[in-house]
Amino acid sequence: MDFSDALRAMKAGARVARSSWKEPGKYIYRVPPRETTLPDGQRVENSAEYLFYRPAKGDHGLVEPYAPLPDALETDDWYVVQDEEA
Protein backbone atom coordinates (compact mmCIF):
# COMPACT_ATOMS: atom_id res chain seq x y z
CA MET A 1 0.00 0.00 0.00
CA ASP A 2 1.13 3.59 -0.44
CA PHE A 3 1.64 6.22 2.28
CA SER A 4 -1.92 7.55 1.91
CA ASP A 5 -3.26 4.08 2.70
CA ALA A 6 -0.79 3.78 5.60
CA LEU A 7 -1.94 7.11 6.99
CA ARG A 8 -5.60 6.06 6.81
CA ALA A 9 -4.72 2.80 8.57
CA MET A 10 -2.91 4.66 11.37
CA LYS A 11 -5.86 7.03 11.80
CA ALA A 12 -7.99 3.92 12.29
CA GLY A 13 -5.62 2.65 15.01
CA ALA A 14 -3.29 0.34 13.08
CA ARG A 15 0.48 0.17 13.25
CA VAL A 16 2.31 0.27 9.92
CA ALA A 17 5.77 -0.58 8.63
CA ARG A 18 7.68 -0.78 5.36
CA SER A 19 8.77 -4.05 3.81
CA SER A 20 12.08 -2.42 2.81
CA TRP A 21 13.10 -1.94 6.45
CA LYS A 22 15.87 -4.42 7.25
CA GLU A 23 15.43 -4.55 11.02
CA PRO A 24 12.34 -6.54 12.09
CA GLY A 25 9.90 -5.23 14.67
CA LYS A 26 9.94 -1.53 13.70
CA TYR A 27 6.64 0.25 13.16
CA ILE A 28 4.90 3.62 13.19
CA TYR A 29 1.71 4.44 15.06
CA ARG A 30 -0.52 7.44 15.71
CA VAL A 31 -1.17 9.00 19.10
CA PRO A 32 -4.48 10.90 18.94
CA PRO A 33 -4.86 14.48 20.19
CA ARG A 34 -4.94 14.73 23.97
CA GLU A 35 -4.89 17.33 26.70
CA THR A 36 -1.63 18.13 28.47
CA THR A 37 -0.46 20.53 31.17
CA LEU A 38 2.17 23.18 30.48
CA PRO A 39 4.83 23.95 33.12
CA ASP A 40 2.81 27.01 34.18
CA GLY A 41 -0.24 24.82 34.87
CA GLN A 42 -2.22 25.85 31.78
CA ARG A 43 -4.16 23.00 30.14
CA VAL A 44 -3.81 22.77 26.36
CA GLU A 45 -4.49 20.17 23.67
CA ASN A 46 -1.64 18.41 21.91
CA SER A 47 -2.09 17.74 18.23
CA ALA A 48 -2.00 14.15 17.01
CA GLU A 49 1.49 12.78 16.59
CA TYR A 50 3.09 9.88 14.79
CA LEU A 51 5.70 7.85 16.64
CA PHE A 52 8.32 5.40 15.42
CA TYR A 53 9.02 2.31 17.54
CA ARG A 54 12.41 0.67 17.20
CA PRO A 55 13.00 -2.54 19.18
CA ALA A 56 16.16 -2.93 21.24
CA LYS A 57 18.21 -6.02 21.85
CA GLY A 58 17.25 -5.98 25.55
CA ASP A 59 13.82 -5.69 27.15
CA HIS A 60 13.08 -2.13 26.05
CA GLY A 61 12.80 -0.37 22.73
CA LEU A 62 12.98 3.24 21.67
CA VAL A 63 10.09 5.50 20.63
CA GLU A 64 10.82 8.70 18.74
CA PRO A 65 8.82 11.23 16.70
CA TYR A 66 8.21 10.25 13.09
CA ALA A 67 8.13 12.59 10.12
CA PRO A 68 8.18 10.87 6.72
CA LEU A 69 11.00 11.59 4.31
CA PRO A 70 10.17 12.08 0.62
CA ASP A 71 11.07 8.47 -0.25
CA ALA A 72 8.56 7.19 2.33
CA LEU A 73 5.82 9.32 0.80
CA GLU A 74 6.43 7.95 -2.68
CA THR A 75 6.78 4.21 -2.06
CA ASP A 76 4.12 1.54 -2.02
CA ASP A 77 5.82 -0.95 0.31
CA TRP A 78 3.81 -0.02 3.42
CA TYR A 79 1.82 -2.70 5.24
CA VAL A 80 -0.27 -3.06 8.39
CA VAL A 81 1.63 -4.72 11.23
CA GLN A 82 -0.15 -7.71 12.71
CA ASP A 83 -0.05 -8.37 16.48
CA GLU A 84 2.35 -11.31 16.18
CA GLU A 85 4.88 -9.09 14.35
CA ALA A 86 5.03 -6.36 16.99
Image (spheres, helix red, strand yellow):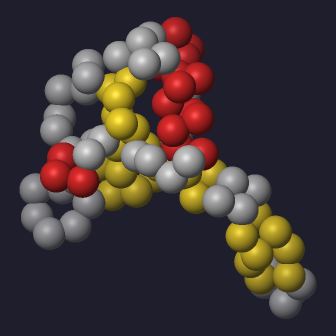
Identify the residue at horizontal 72%, vertical 70% (top origin).
34
Viewed as shown, does residue 61 lie left or right of 72? left
Q: Residue furthest left?
A: 57
For residue 24, side relative to residue 14 (left or right): left
Q: Quadrant of residue 63?
A: bottom left
Residue in view at x 38 percent, y 24 percent: 78
User: Left or right: 39 with respect to 28?
Assistant: right
Identify whether 37 is placed above or below 58: below
Residue 54: x percent and y percent?
Answer: 29, 49
Residue 3 point in image, percent of width and height: 52, 22
The residue drawn where x is 65% and y is 59% is 32
Q: Is residue 79 above or below residue 57?
A: above
Q: Position of residue 49 (x, y in %)?
A: 63, 52
Q: Could you tell me if residue 69 is visible in this image? A: no
Identified at 14% across, 69% down, the residue is: 59
Residues 83 and 57: in front is 83
